[in-house]
């Protein structure tokens, strides 16, 4: 799969980035049904990047995917809250507690809006 990876990610030990990118693109093509796969693949890659100390790359990738998924499924889809939680964890691990709190608040708002409760 290395030849399918973006040039800036080749040779860095990232687990199957090409698969993640394909899963994310499938969200656009296939709709909501593939959001879970994209989320799981992203989660695996972000964990690997974080283990390697590459927090900025993990954050950038997560924000990009959140933006792409939000465009496809809307701002209140439950899958979006799970992706935002992933970003919250990244922020908290790098000491960006206010950013983490903002993510938690946004994710909670999504969950509440899907359960019929309003905060």
Image (spheres, rainbow, N blue to C red):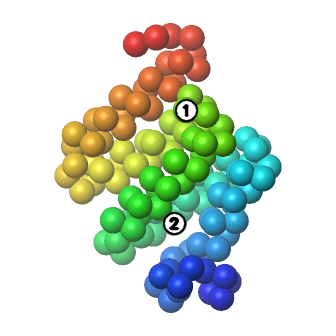
Q: In the rendered structure, are the residues bearing label 1 and label 2 in contact, judged by CB atoms less than 8 Å apart?
A: no
Quadrant assignment for the C terminus: top left
Closer-to-camera residue (14/109): 109
Residue 102: x and y, percent? 31, 35
Residue 38, which numbered label? none
For marks 1 and 2, the one nearer the N-term is 2
Residue 54 appears in which quarter of the rendering?
bottom left
x and y, in percent, of residue 118 in the image = 46, 11
Label 1, residues with CA under 10 Å away: few <14, some 14-19, many ≥20 = some
Q: Is residue 21 above or below residue 98?
A: below
Relative to 74, is 86 on the left or the right?
Answer: left
Q: In this rendering, would 9 be left or right of 23?
A: left
Which residue sits at x=43%, y=42%? 85
Residue 3 lies left or right of residue 82; in this view the side is right
Q: Quadrant of the N terminus?
A: bottom right
Provide the residue designation for mark 1: 75
Up the image or down, 61 lies above or below 12; here it is above
Q: How many angstroms separate mark 1 from mark 2 (CA)?
A: 23 Å
Going by the image, does 29 lie left or right of 102? right
- Which residue is rendered at x = 44% and y = 48% of the image? 86
What residue is rendered at 61% in x and 34% in y? 74
State whether residue 63 appears in this view.
yes
Residue 109 image point, x, y percent: 44, 23
- Asked if one can make out residue 51 in the rendered structure from this viewpoint, the answer is no
- Of residues 59 and 43, the one nearer the viewer is 59
The relative height of residue 75 versus residue 66 in the rendered view (above or below) is above
* Residue at mark 2: 45
């Amino acid at each position: 799969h290395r030849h399918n990876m973006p040039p800036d990610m080749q040779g860095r030990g990232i687990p199957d980035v090409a698969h993640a990118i394909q899963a994310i693109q499938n969200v656009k093509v296939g709709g909501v049904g593939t959001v879970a796969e994209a989320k799981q693949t992203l989660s695996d890659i972000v964990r690997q990047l974080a283990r390697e100390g590459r927090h900025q790359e993990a954050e950038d990738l997560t924000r990009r995917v959140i933006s792409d998924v939000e465009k496809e499924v809307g701002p209140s889809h439950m899958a979006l809250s799970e992706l935002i939680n992933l970003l919250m964890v990244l922020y908290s691990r790098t000491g960006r507690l206010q950013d983490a709190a903002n993510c938690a608040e946004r994710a909670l708002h999504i969950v509440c809006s899907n359960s019929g409760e309003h905060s």
